Amino acid sequence: MLANYRMAVVGRQYACNNLETNILLANTLCNCLFDEEANAASIEGEELIRAKELASLPIKLIISNPPCSDSIRNNTTADFSQIIDLMDDFRPPVENRHGRQNIQKQINNPFMQFLRWSCVKLLNSENHSVLAMVVPLSFLEAESYKYARKYLTEHFSNLWAIAIDTDARTGIRGDSLFYTMQGRAVILLTRKYGEATSITNINYLDISRGKRAQKLDVLETDINSIMESFDNFDISDTMYSFMPSRPFNETMYSEFWPISSERGDKAVFLNQCSGAKMAPTALLTHVKQPMLKRRSREISSEGIPKAKEWIGRQDKNVVDAKITAFQDALRTCSTRQELDGVLNENIRLCSFRPFVNSNVLLWEKIFEYQAGVGGGGARIRPEIKAVYDLEDTVGFALAHAPKDLDESLGQFTSFCWYFPDNDLSRRGNGHIYMNQYIPNTRTNKVINNLHPDLIEHLSGLTGLSAAECSRKMVFYSYAVFCSQVFLEEFYGALFVVNQSESRARIPVVNDAEIFLQLSNMGEQLAALEKNGVEVENILGYDYDNIVSQLPNGFRLEHSRSASKNPYDEENEQFIVRDEVNGAEIRVYCPLAIQKFNVAGYNVVKDCWLKFHSYRFTHCEFTAQDFRELLDLFNIIATQMRIVTEIDEVIHGIVDGDTPLLSYNTEDR
């Protein structure tokens, strides 16, 4: 009723004397809109019958803003079998499909189904036709939608794509037109009836970073005056992306080695694995081991009230059932001595966030009890737990979708000396690359994780053993991925959404001296993320004088409020603030350190400060903690200095002065 009223108002407003509207309440994706009969005796059936009549008329134009949800999957019953079958056109070829394939999860998203339905209606119409649809911004380039984009390019004649809103989940601030966290875009496709259809180039406009009023102005501007603002680029048959990438040296990049491969193709590393999901994190982890033990003992004894006291102010609420399951598991220990033994044996160091190591309680009985509780659970990854039980395992975490992390490309890797957490990348998973691997935890057989061709080449080049070569390659890869020259030179290739068939590539030098030089510098970088590292006082702090300003009972604050930002950029200071009385201690902190981001995290504020704050530790900020913070500033300054040295070597590679082991041939 309300919709009909609004359309009547529109008709009067624009003096549309010949306006005839039909507004129906029906799910047009069901089989009744194709060839099945609806129940005419029901109100729903009447609407479906009328909808079918209208949808059977020649359709020239479809304009839509269909529902889009990552979780709602309503249209999956037998009543929707025909649209479900049609969705196969948006899936990978049959030979490329396999179980637990994440890129197929979005196929039955409601907006995708309606897009496919729209294609059916327009392509069956014996008229020129137009499709205009609001879609998630990720539709323009995400791998999940690759084959949908391919289908559109093969069945329509022209395409315009407009990025409307940024994806706020990446941390990009924007004035959204659609008031959603998820980014939004508009695609407009035309089809010339009777002519061969194929789109070879895309017209693209990005207004996503403008203010809302500016976006409306662009969208309401006369089409003839706005057309020249569109960029035109050739479509690639690799991803069929509707969004352009920054140009880079594609010939040189093709000679680099993929870091890994989903399909078993030749790559630097044979295996990679997501880090462990240690949920609920608030119960299982703490940056201070003694506090993790104490908290676990107290929750075991006093249950939910004590848990709320410890973790009640953290960002993510832990449901009571999870706390009870945690308590019940610990209470299977009949004595305090037995409980202490369990804690001593099962608490281990973990690489928790970039440049922040923590402690995690990994006791199987806890996960058994938690498994019976609804909601997200832990994924401990037995294969990675087993390999990190080995003392000589080294690895690094890599984000496979850097474009999901930030508005521009930055460092998207961190080192893992300890059992790695899944959230080493702020969005998506932290994928762990190691020198060795255990494919089968039943046999626990350890294999070298480097490709045999690389082992043979590097052993011959350096004279090192296979095990030494794989370890060196981990540090070498880490050095390359940290290089700012490498990131800038191949920005267009690296700043991408997840592409399972096209992992990031790195150059493999065919020069023993340079390989070992980069590997050694990578090891120096990695050492900065190890507990107990001794670091040079580059920033010239008077540690004793600064720490002496810390009063007893100080509760370190971590707040998302802009008014309590710990950074004073103008004066290049970091503000150590007490959450109770607001007392401040100001410490010199260069702007570069304040802005140091890794894998989507601001390292100092989002990682160190957050997990050392009173809200997360429930213990006072000590002099030793303060010294660790000052050490972190010096560690980051040292990291930047080493990266500058790495960049000098990488310059020789990108300039073509260093011989490479080409991915395509034996050497160059």
Image: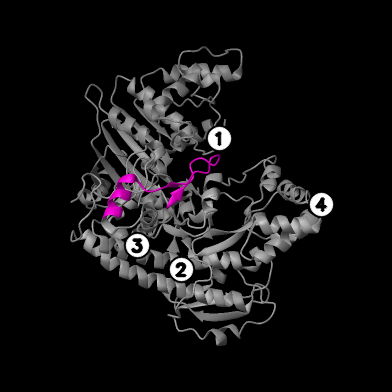
Give the mark, 2 or 1, whose residue is nearer the N terminus: 1
Asked whether the viewer can see residue 158, the reply is: yes
Give the mark, 3 or 4, whose residue is nearer the N terminus: 4
Q: CA distance from mark 2 to mark 3?
A: 15 Å
User: Is the residue marked by circle 2 packed among few (<14), some (14-19), or many (20+) residues within 10 Å?
Assistant: many
Q: Does dot 4 land on a helix, a strand or a loop?
A: loop
Foreground mark, 2 or 4, reads 4
Residue annotated with mark 4: 334
User: Is the residue marked by circle 4 packed among few (<14), some (14-19), or many (20+) residues within 10 Å?
Assistant: few
Asked whether the viewer can see residue 182, the reply is: no
How far across and how far down the image is residue 343, in percent?
70, 57
Asked if marks 2 and 4 touch (Cβ < 8 Å), the reply is no
What kind of residue is marked 3? Ser
Q: CA distance from mark 3 to mark 4?
A: 50 Å
Residue annotated with mark 2: 528
| Location of residue 510 (image quadrant) | bottom left
Q: Does dot 2 land on a helix, a strand or a loop?
A: loop
What kind of residue is marked 1? Ile
From this view, report whether residue 233 is shown above or below residue 518.
above
357, 196: nearer the viewer: 357
Foreground mark, 2 or 1, reads 2
Left or right? Give the position of 494 relative to 225: right
Q: Mark number for residue 284?
A: none
Give the mark, 4 or 1, whose residue is nearer the N terminus: 1
Residue annotated with mark 1: 72
Asked if marks 3 and 1 touch (Cβ < 8 Å), the reply is no
Look at the image and say whether residue 446 sits in the magenta stretch.
yes
How far across and how far down the image is residue 52, in percent?
47, 18
What kind of residue is marked 2? Leu
Residue annotated with mark 3: 519
